[in-house]
Image: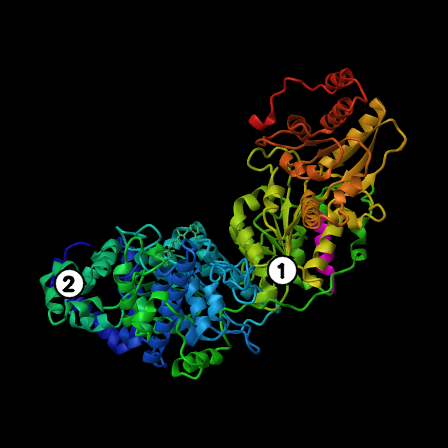
Amino acid sequence: MTADSDSLETQEWLDAFDAICRAQGSERATFILDQLQEHATQQGIQLPKSVTTPFCNTIPVNRQKAMPGDLFMERRIRSLVRWNALAMVMRANQKSEGIGGHIASFSSAATLYDIGFNYFFRGNQGDHLGDLIFFQGHSAPGMYARSFLEGRLSEQQLDNFRREVDGEGLSSYPHPWLMPDYWQFPTVSMGLGPIQAIYQAHVMRYLSARGLVPREDRKVWAFLGDGECDEPESLGAISLAGREELENLVFVINCNLQRLDGPVRGNGKIIQELEGVFRGAGWNVIKVIWGRHWDALLEKDTSGLLVKRMNEVCDGDLQNYKYNGGAYTREHFFGKYPELLDLVKDMTDDQIMALNRGGHDPYKVYAAYAEAMESKGKPTVILAHTVKGYGLGGAGEAANDTHSVKKLDIDSLKKFRDRFAIPIADDQLESVPYYRPAEDSPEISYMMRQRENLGGPLPARRASFEAMQAPSLEAFIKQLESSGERQISTTMAFVRVLSTLIKDKNIGNRVVPIVPDEARTFGMEGMFRQLGIYSSAGQQYVPHDHQQIMYYKEDKKGVILEEGINEAGAMSAWLALATAYSTSACPMIPFYIFYSMFGFQRIGDLAWASGDSQARGFLIGATAGRTTLNGEGLQHQDGHSHILANTIPNCKSYDATYSYELAVIVQNGIKCMYEDQENCFYYLTTMNENYVQPEMPKGVEDGIIKGMYQFASAVDASAKLKVKLMGAGTIFNEVLAAAEILRQDYQVEADIWSLTSVNQLVREGQAIDRWNLLHPTDKPKTAYITQQLGDSADPVIVATDYMKAYGEQIRPYVRQPMHVLGTDGYGRSDSRTALRHFFEVDRHFIALSALKALSDQGHIKASVVEQAIKKFAIDPEKLNPLYQ
Ligand SMILES: Cc1ncc(C[n+]2csc(CCOP(=O)(O)OP(=O)(O)O)c2C)c(N)n1
Ligand SMILES: [Mg+2]
């Protein structure tokens, strides 16, 4: 800032401005400023650009909505919550050292939650569907403690915090998978809560625009840490929220200025930084920096020096003041300017220490939430200034290592008890007993009444939903037939399956295609016009291609979610729809179609959170396969997504070859998830290689679902030389070609299986193994794979477009000699033929593997194999693709 060269003139301007504010209000004042700004720009004057305001509360005292409840009662309740949260973590660690838990995060956030519980968070009793609340993962002990006071959780359950294996334990963090009636959203992986919340709010609007779920006044609340804001996922989607005017979204960022290791921005100001970022993204920003005890000081400070000092200090200083206390703060904060020292000369050090931060002041927090409720056309972020480890005193308040504090020594515990007036005697303190006043005590009655008025206790998750009827397989008759002469890819076949589903009168309107700017790649552009692309703004321009049949149609009631080049966003939209059965009592069937390489590998942690969330829906890894997506090269060719998909326990994955396989899998998937209400979701790969799609053979449906079925049998079953060939996806066509070579050139006959899901087969095999292990005297059961392959010793060759590790998984269930072909190594751009030779999964390598296996068995001579290598033009010294 430049120096003030004429302070009298400056004062005149300020007085004039104040007069406008007083006489005509803030709207007129803003107008005048806008006019001045425009005028200055026209004069060519460069104006300083700022998206931040001074380090002060956004809501001035005179605009602060008054909190209607009983401040003192609420403080008592909050103290009880604080105590029980602390007791739970301490007792868990007394019983079992190292079991963990956190105290400091919730300590800093207790008021932020309390105000929400007492006045704002709506439960889902009655007609109201309830607000969606993302609780910060490390604050879970605080939520359990409140539920304990409400009588929802017992002492025993609290004692089983982090002991989930036996009995009714409480999960370490919010996990709907583990506590399906309680936690709604997994949040503890930093960044996933905020991005999920944004897309929940977005999808809430989408569902209401389509007339599926009434919009009402539901809100999505997301509580997150200031350190967490460093995650790209936390801030990466905030512009969507601004652009889409998600007024149903409230972020509460607990700015305790610390993360795990130390300060978030020791040398800067995280609140100011976040203010700029969010305001720039079109959010309504409410800073709650200073508590009400500062108000009197600020009013007294007519020189503006106090605000200047507030602006000057960095977060490291602010943390240091709280750590060192009142005397230190007097000397180092106020002491910089004699006028400020003078301002606090009548205050004791304790009073200075008690100058509270905004996030610990119920009045300030209430006013901020109340204003957020009224925000129109903008999401709101509340930046609440707090103290990490609040109330822990010397045991960790504002200390760099407070995040990991799990217990207080007896002295600190006494101080904590006294500070929060918990009626527990000294001689009982050692065991840190829980404390819960009687059912009819004023405290419990008050907190119960507040929740009753707001629709019941929270957190709570709706676990059940009304089943939907899946279409029968006959509905997909076109996809079960042969494509005749026409060659089509499975990606195209999938689009047809999707079109059939969308026409279904029962569930068609629940189907939502989601794409991250790749619909044309998958041949889905026909759907733009047919279904429309959801846009809350409709289409305010004439699309240049409007005269074409398949023009780019944006629509307020559009069905397709086109989320732009944003896999994390599209996945979050999918997750919001995939959990709509729970969050909005409206089961949806989302299909997220993406480049398979940019699927699990890119958004793996969101997929993991989806499993935890009990998502229902389909993920489609399109243009999949290491050698099938020719030309695109190393970064595009996926040879491992099925291995990644298999890491998620409730994700079923399939690598289909044919249109009818896809139809059977999708039909069965809908039946499993929505009719039988199985808790799972699906990952399917589809490819862009065109070939003729055959008609479905009779009776293969069950095998398709289980993971393998016999597609063809040896023409001459009594042939001397026989092998069993298995293949998946497009490589199955290579298997068929290899069988031809073997029969014609080597008189080797083959039984052939289509391997629709190695992962599903192996899960079944492992379950059988386990059963046999635990039931040694019972008749052993046999895995489905083993049954299919029978007793003959004919060697088995497995070939897929995925890493060998994928196919190798079935080895324990194969009694025959077995050889696996797969695509290990980095991809590269070339033709499919060249790639399949390079990765050694083409027909020649399959045939060669079969011959070698027969030679190993002594059925043919090694020289025949050697000749085959020559005949197939394979260089025996060819480099291993794994290392190239
Ligand atoms: C993706 C991810 N990385 C790291 C962690 C480990 N972790 C847990 S809490 C935490 C610090 C959180 O700081 P902040 O967001 O400021 O929350 P606070 O506890 O201060 O409220 C870290 C690094 C995690 N949970 N998730
Ligand atoms: Mg923090």
| Number of the label disc, if any, that sits on residue 139 | none
Q: Please indicate whether residue 232 sits to the left or right of residue 618 in the image.
A: left
Boundaries of the magenta span: 494-505
Q: Earlier in the sequence, mark 2 or mark 1?
A: 2
The quarter of the rendering in which ligand 2 is drawn is bottom left
Q: Is residue 572 above or below residue 727?
A: below
Tell me where residue 478 appears, x and y as whole percent: 80, 51
Q: Considering depth in this image, is 554 or 285 the residue closer to the camera?
A: 285
Whether disc 2's CB lies below 8 Å from ligand 2 is answered: no
How dense is the environment of label 1, judged by Cα within 10 Å: few (below 14), some, or many (20 and up)?
many
Residue 636 visible: yes
- Name the residue at 43% across, 73% down: 117
The stretch drawn in magenta includes residue 497: yes
Residue 570 visible: no
What amino acid is labelled 1 in the image?
Val
Element marked by disc 1: loop
Which image quadrant is residue 463 in?
A: bottom right
Which image quadrant is residue 68 in?
A: bottom left
Read off the residue under disc 2. Answer: 327
Q: CA distance from mark 2 to mark 1?
A: 62 Å
- Name the residue at 55% across, 51% down: 608
- Name the residue at 22% across, 68% down: 355
